[in-house]
Image (spheres, rainbow, N blue to C red):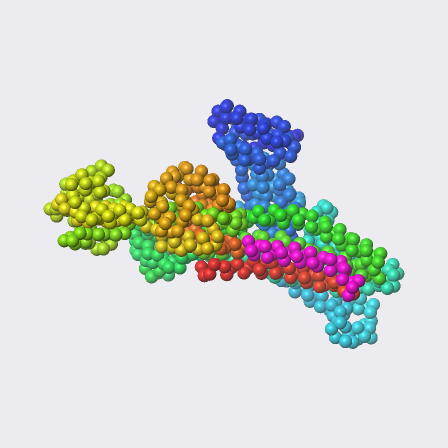
């Protein structure tokens, strides 16, 4: 039999014996590792020792260049009812050798487990969670993203509604018989004169037993086994409380001589009302939880079920899953585009708000990319499929949102530590309350009421729901606004950033040069000069030349063909256009040719200070004008910087441009901290230096900024609707609009505020009501909390937490 202290797993990066030796020495140097061996042939590592920190193993091997291969799977987990369940299910997985991390989400009833490949299997992990008392079933990618998840939740809602109705109908006569006199005078006397107290109690016993064995059976089915495992949770508290009330009442009914005469009473109404109220609370909670996942449901519903596809020259209707890459689909006006693709025929405006959050439709014509699920306008399009199934942008968005919703925020770690000891502490408190009441209280009944009330009021459902429900709703709402949180933890970190560093080109600027100014000397026509220089630049591949040609075409100018074209290295271009010799380029070129610039030099110098590149033009040896070309700042950039500054965020800019150009852009935007002349591989070092000023976020276009995005505390990629798979970013803006950065920060702050509200309510509620339930107010005002009131308060607590989280659906304005 293998030694349980020995762990075997797979590693990457081994290419020779020296690699194996280095990896082996790294492992041997880790704390608590008694032995380590690395096999080059199998790419397998084996370590032995007690209490080995697997996170340390992973980090050390990553740093050495021989990363441990990890696998991650999701599981559906049934039987979760409170925060204590979450902790026990997680420990069921993490106690397995090789499991690096396990995160259980109470709101979605799912578990995400990561382990070292070769150390465990999916089936083994599912078995371990099941052994902890919760039924775990591995989920495939298709199951994770399928509407069946919503259908399953709706089944739970319907089941709880049915159980609540049955419990309420059976409980109503019990409540009326025992508590009716508190609301309608004379009820007790009427019962005594008609059926009599013994018959009343017997009827209550029958109905209460039906409630506990029927709708309430789930509490006993899950609660008592948890007690036998010494792992009590919410169901255990309810089972103990209701069974205590039922047993005491049954003794009063069937064996009254066992009790003091003053203590003979029945509490069947407390047992049934507790079950009914908790079931009612769970029903409301389940209904609200369905709404927390509505963003995923809405995204999935964007995909059409069928599409028109050209097959053998004819349009035929096929199921969406039958479309293959390369198929041409017909998209009629107002229809949803079925798959990601490229327009091969037609022209229309497409509403891409479901991806970008921007409500204004964008024009799409031949050669343009379109995204599946977006809505076509009034024109017909023929679209060639480039991505289908799980490879589409929509599928990628769904995966990202699901991963973020299932994430565990750092703040949850504190909650987990408290909850781990909470239920045992409640059991202890209830026991102490009963003992004190038995010693000092007037009757045994008072001890029972206090003990049951403490057990019921302290159920930690709200604690377990406080964080995941807010994360689910917040990340879903962010997706509707075109902001994808690839990592749920980024929600918390982004709310704490003190510095935001921006890449310049493509992020703060448009990412391409454009003509910004044209000045011509007296005697020359601006349109004619622009057309002539465009004719020369059309033969060049330089981005500046492309900008000038584009400007001429946008003005509708006729661009003639140039002849005798020559490129003057480092200086400019020359050619003949309509018989005239056109010279264009830098100031140095004009100086070399002896051309008098006649005041154009001062204009060009001013432009240079504004981060614009001047291009001089001479026609037949005479200066004609100068054109300014620049990568223009995005219209919203200045307002973004201003608003961030107002919020107390320090704004910096990191760019590979020269210091002069970078400073000019920074001055225009009001940015005071500039790091210029940085190559892409040096941006990570620049980010590390800026981190000294507090938590830092880096915003880049996701193309050349991967090192900086990874180095920042939060990496934010600003791209386009198709740039979903920016692997190094924590947050992805689906629109190029920088306003998404403000949306992301605002949402992160709102989510964290919402979580703090939920946690305050959950903990403050328990802190305040447990002593009241135990009876601390009785010596002063004769007040002893009813178990029924305790059940109602407990149910209300969970419903409040989920309802509060749902307020985030209105965050950020309209999508």
Report the magenta residues as a range. 752-781
**Residue 772 belongs to magenta span:** yes
Tell which of 318 and 757 is nearer to you. 757
Q: Looking at the image, is 203 positioned above or below residue 396?
A: below
Q: Residue at x 49, y 42 (%)?
A: 692
Q: Looking at the image, is 48 positioned above or below residue 438?
A: above
Q: Residue at x 33, y 44 (%)?
A: 661
Q: Looking at the image, is 359 positioned above or below residue 720?
A: below
Q: Looking at the image, is 675 positioned above or below residue 741?
A: above
**Residue 227 belongs to magenta span:** no
Residue 238 percent across, percent down from the top left = 71, 56
Q: Residue at x 49, y 44 (%)?
A: 693
Q: Residue at x 37, y 59 (%)?
A: 360
Magenta: main secondary structure equals helix
In the visual, does 106 lie left or right of 636? Answer: right
- Quarter of the figure with the C terminus: bottom left
Residue 719 percent across, percent down from the top left = 40, 49
């Amino acid at each position: 039999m293998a030694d349980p202290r020995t762990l075997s797993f797979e590693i990457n990066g081994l290419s020779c014996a020296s690699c194996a030796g280095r990896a082996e020495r790294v492992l041997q140097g880790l704390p608590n590792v008694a032995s380590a061996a690395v096999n080059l042939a199998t790419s397998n590592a084996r370590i032995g020792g007690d209490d080995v920190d697997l996170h340390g193993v992973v980090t050390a091997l990553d740093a050495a260049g021989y990363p441990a291969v990890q696998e991650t799977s999701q599981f559906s987990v049934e039987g979760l009812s409170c925060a204590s369940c979450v902790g026990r299910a997680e420990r069921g997985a993490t106690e397995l050798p090789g499991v690096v991390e396990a995160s259980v989400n109470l709101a979605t009833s799912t578990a995400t487990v990561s382990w070292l490949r070769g150390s465990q299997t999916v089936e083994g992990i599912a078995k371990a969670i099941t052994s902890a008392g919760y039924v775990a079933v591995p989920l495939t990618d298709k199951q994770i993203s399928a509407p069946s998840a919503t259908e399953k939740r709706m089944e739970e809602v319907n089941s709880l509604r049915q159980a609540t109705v049955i419990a309420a109908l059976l409980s109503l006569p019990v409540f009326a018989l025992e508590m009716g006199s508190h609301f309608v005078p004379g009820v007790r006397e009427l019962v005594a004169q008609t059926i009599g107290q013994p018959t009343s109690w017997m009827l209550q016993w029958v109905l209460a037993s039906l409630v506990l064995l029927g709708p309430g059976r789930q509490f006993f089915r899950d609660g008592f086994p948890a007690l036998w495992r010494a792992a009590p949770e919410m169901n255990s508290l309810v089972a103990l409380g209701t069974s205590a009330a039922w047993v005491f009442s049954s003794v009063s009914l069937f064996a009254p001589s066992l009790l003091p005469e003053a203590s003979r009473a029945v509490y069947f109404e407390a047992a049934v009302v507790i079950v009914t109220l908790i079931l009612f609370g769970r029903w409301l909670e389940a209904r609200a939880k369905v709404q927390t996942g509505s963003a995923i449901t809405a995204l999935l519903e964007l995909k059409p079920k069928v599409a028109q596809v050209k097959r053998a020259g004819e349009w035929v209707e096929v199921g969406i899953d039958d479309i293959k890459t390369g198929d041409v689909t017909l998209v009629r006006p107002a229809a949803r585009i079925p798959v990601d693709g490229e327009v091969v025929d037609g022209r229309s405006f497409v509403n891409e708000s479901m991806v970008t959050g921007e409500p204004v439709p964008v024009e799409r014509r031949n050669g343009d990319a379109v995204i599946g699920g977006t809505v076509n306008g009034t024109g017909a399009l023929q679209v060639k499929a480039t991505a289908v199934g799980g490879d589409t942008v929509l599928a990628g968005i769904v995966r990202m949102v699901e991963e973020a919703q299932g994430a565990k925020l750092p703040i949850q770690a504190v909650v987990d530590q408290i909850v781990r000891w909470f239920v045992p502490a409640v059991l202890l408190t209830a026991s102490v309350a009963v003992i004190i009441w038995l010693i000092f209280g007037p009757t045994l009944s008072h001890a029972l009421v206090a003990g049951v009330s403490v057990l019921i009021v302290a159920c930690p459902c709200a604690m377990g729901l406080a964080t995941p429900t807010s994360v689910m709703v917040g990340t879903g709402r962010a997706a509707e606004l075109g902001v994808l949180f690839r990592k749920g933890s980024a929600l918390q970190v982004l709310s704490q950033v003190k510095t935001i560093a921006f890449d310049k080109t493509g992020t703060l600027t448009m990412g391409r040069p454009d003509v910004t100014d044209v000045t011509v000397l007296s005697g020359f026509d601006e349109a004619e000069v622009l057309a002539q220089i465009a004719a020369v630049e059309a033969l060049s591949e330089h981005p500046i030349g492309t900008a000038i040609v584009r400007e001429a075409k946008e003005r509708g100018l006729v661009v003639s063909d140039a002849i005798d074209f020559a490129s003057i290295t480092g200086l400019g271009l020359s050619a003949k256009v309509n018989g005239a010799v056109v010279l264009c380029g830098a100031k140095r070129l004009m100086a070399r040719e002896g051309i008098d610039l006649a005041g154009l030099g001062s204009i060009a110098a001013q432009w240079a200070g504004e981060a614009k590149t001047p291009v001089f033009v001479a026609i037949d040896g005479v200066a004609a004008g100068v054109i300014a070309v620049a990568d223009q700042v995005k219209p919203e950039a200045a307002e973004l910087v201003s608003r961030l500054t107002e919020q107390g965020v320090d704004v910096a800019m990191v760019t590979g441009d020269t210091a002069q150009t970078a400073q000019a852009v920074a001055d225009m935007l009001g940015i005071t901290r500039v790091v210029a002349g940085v190559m892409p591989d040096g941006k990570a070092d620049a980010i590390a230096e800026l981190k000294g000023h507090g938590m830092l976020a880096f915003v880049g276009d996701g193309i050349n900024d991967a090192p900086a995005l990874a180095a920042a505390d939060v990496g934010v990629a600003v791209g386009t609707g198709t740039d979903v798979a920016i692997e190094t970013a924590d947050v992805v803006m689906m629109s190029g609009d920088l306003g998404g950065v403000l949306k992301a920060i605002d949402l992160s702050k709102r989510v964290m505020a919402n979580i703090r509200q939920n946690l305050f309510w959950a903990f403050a509620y328990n802190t305040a009501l447990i002593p009241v339930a135990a009876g601390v107010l009785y010596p002063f005002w004769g007040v002893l909390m009813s178990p029924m009131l305790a059940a109602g308060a407990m149910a209300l607590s969970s419903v409040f937490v989920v309802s509060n989280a749902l307020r985030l659906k209105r965050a950020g304005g309209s999508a």
